């Protein structure tokens, strides 16, 4: 084995842990991930730092909370000067590659809306970075040119992008389609679909063939890059990022018909009346089955949940087949015995839990909990029920690589848990900021959550109400104790703990250079 291990980091987009075989689903077929789980440490209580793509992906890369690294919501690119664990690995001689979805920068959508929310042209922060530093993931740009990436993209020396989601992807993938003699506009989107579920336009069978679908592209390009590492003395870090199973739910070919919607389970909390919930939940229930915009969370019908789940399971099974091919490549190239493998996702999806769909402004477990597997060759396998977070991954991987954590990191290394030790944290903080009034409080959403081993507290700016659940007694989060007399003691305890954690996760960087 080399002095330092290599790393394969597999990440999916908007993927609940119970939408895998190893996570408890008896329906979705994920044999390759299940086999990986059987020889990994499986973290059953892994939560995000933020249940939205860009903030949590940036947290994974930096080991810092979104309010600290600055990417508080989708639309703020991760600062070009941010330290990342990938940059540390590269400085230590690792070959580094990012293939698939990055989403550390804007994908270029809805920029015209920003002036409505932020009319001032002056900001408290000024960027000194050269023009264009934040435009490498602009999806429209990728449709018109093959975008040349910088030599150091947040620490990655090789970058091959899919931008956006499902069959709508742009990025280097789009230019690759053109090179294959394929007109993407003739295949992408619901207008070209082979089959559609008429009650929700975001469920359809794409016209893109299996071999040209983004999942196949990410798999093939990852295998190609891994094959180039065969026989090399340098360790590597590969970020293999699938844009699925994020909505729209558009599996190609056989994967669209792999699962019967009528056989899909509706969550047992689907009929939650939200009697004691925030008002916006009851507001959504009034318009069940109606989604206003592409990313807006809403209250789906049972049929919508079933059809979306069947299509999503097809997307997940396609990813699983790709993972199997990549793991076989590791074996074939002789790198399996010295490669640490991580599998996780950037956040979850309500998927019918509590009668809701998608994400944003909701910190139920469906959105905040993610799958997390860490496989070390020769390491312990098992199931860990201790709390872990996306915030912890950067420090964990640096320790496994034999590298020191850098100043300003805010997570905890999970290596003690990989070795069967005690828990490294008693609680964790989940942040979420949005420019939209997601909670109908007359202002942009800002919410903070504390998750402990047996409880959850969520506070919303602009509201005297919130969420408080005794998870030991109420694991499905159905009895909101926030305003109830029996919840006063627990609410007071968690409120103080949250305040203390917010102090602890305030920024400690940069290192001071003088005393005065």
Image (cartoon, rainbow, N blue to C red):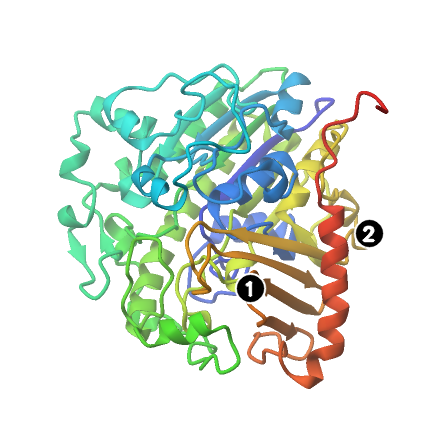
Give the vertical position of 259 relative to 377 (above or below). Answer: below
Give the vertical position of 113 relative to 31 (above or below). Answer: above
Instruction: Kindly give the residue lying farthest to the right in the view shown.
Output: 515
Residue ID for mark 2: 421
Given residues 201 and 15, the one toward you in this image is 201
| Residue 135, x across and y down, in percent | 39, 25
Give the vertical position of 1 relative to 102 (above or below). Answer: above
Residue drawn 57% across the image and 75% down it: 476
- Element at badge 1? helix
The alpha-carbon separation of the residues under discs 1 and 2 comes to 25 Å
Residue drawn 69% across the image and 85% down it: 485
Residue drawn 48% across the image and 65% down it: 25
Rendered image quadrant of residue 172: top left
| Residue 175, x across and y down, in percent | 27, 24
Given residues 223 and 415, the one toward you in this image is 415
Give the vertical position of 132 relative to 214 (above or below). Answer: above
| Residue 197, x across and y down, in percent | 20, 62
- Element at badge 2? loop
Nearest to N terminus: mark 1 or mark 2: 1
């Amino acid at each position: 084995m080399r002095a330092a291990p290599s790393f394969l980091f597999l990440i999916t987009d908007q993927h609940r842990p119970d939408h895998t075989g190893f996570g408890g689903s008896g329906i979705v077929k994920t044999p390759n991930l299940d086999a990986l789980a059987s020889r990994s440490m499986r973290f059953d209580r892994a939560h995000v730092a933020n249940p939205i793509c860009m903030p949590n992906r940036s947290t994974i890369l930096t080991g810092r909370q979104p309010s600290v690294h600055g990417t508080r919501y989708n639309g703020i690119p991760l600062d070009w000067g941010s330290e990342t664990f990938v940059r540390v690995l590269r400085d230590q001689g690792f070959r580094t590659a990012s293939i698939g979805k990055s989403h550390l920068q804007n994908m270029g959508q809805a920029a015209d809306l920003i002036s409505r929310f932020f009319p001032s042209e002056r900001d408290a922060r000024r960027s000194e970075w050269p023009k264009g530093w934040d435009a490498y993931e602009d999806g429209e740009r990728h449709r018109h040119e093959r975008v040349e990436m910088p030599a150091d993209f947040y620490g990655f020396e090789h970058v091959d992008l899919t931008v956006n989601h499902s069959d709508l992807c742009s990025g280097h993938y789009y230019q690759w389609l053109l090179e294959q003699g394929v007109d993407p506009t003739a295949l992408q989107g619901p207008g070209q679909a082979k089959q559609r579920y008429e009650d929700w336009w975001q469920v359809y069978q794409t016209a893109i063939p299996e071999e040209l679908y983004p999942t196949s592209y990410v798999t093939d390009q990852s295998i190609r890059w891994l094959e180039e590492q065969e026989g090399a003395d340098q360790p590597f870090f590969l970020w293999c990022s699938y844009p699925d199973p994020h909505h729209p739910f558009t599996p190609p070919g056989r994967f669209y018909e792999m699962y019967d919607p009528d056989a899909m389970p509706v969550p047992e909390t689907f009929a939650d009346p939200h009697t004691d919930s925030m008002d916006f939940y009851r507001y959504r229930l009034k318009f069940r089955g109606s989604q206003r915009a592409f990313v807006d969370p809403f209250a789906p019908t049972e049929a919508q949940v079933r059809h979306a789940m069947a299509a999503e399971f097809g997307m997940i099974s396609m990813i699983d087949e790709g993972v199997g091919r990549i793991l076989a490549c590791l074996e074939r190239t002789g790198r399996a015995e010295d490669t640490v493998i991580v599998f996780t996702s950037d956040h979850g999806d309500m998927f019918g839990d509590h009668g809701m769909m998608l994400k944003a402004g909701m910190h139920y477990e469906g959105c905040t909990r993610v799958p997390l597997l860490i496989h070390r060759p020769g390491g312990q396998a098992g199931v860990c029920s201790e709390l872990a977070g996306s915030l912890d991954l950067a420090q964990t991987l640096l320790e496994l690589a034999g590298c020191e954590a850098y100043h300003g990191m805010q997570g905890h290394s999970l290596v003690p848990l990989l070795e069967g030790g005690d828990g490294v944290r008693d609680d964790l903080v989940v942040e979420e900021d949005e420019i939209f009034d997601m909670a109908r409080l007359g202002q942009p959403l800002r919410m903070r959550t504390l998750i402990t081993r047996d409880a959850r507290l969520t506070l919303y700016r602009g509201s005297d109400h919130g969420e408080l659940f005794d998870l030991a007694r109420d694991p499905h989060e159905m009895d909101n104790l926030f305003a109830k007399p029996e919840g006063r003691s627990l609410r007071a305890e968690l409120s103080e703990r949250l305040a203390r954690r917010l102090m602890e996760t305030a920024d400690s960087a940069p290192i001071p250079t003088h005393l005065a």
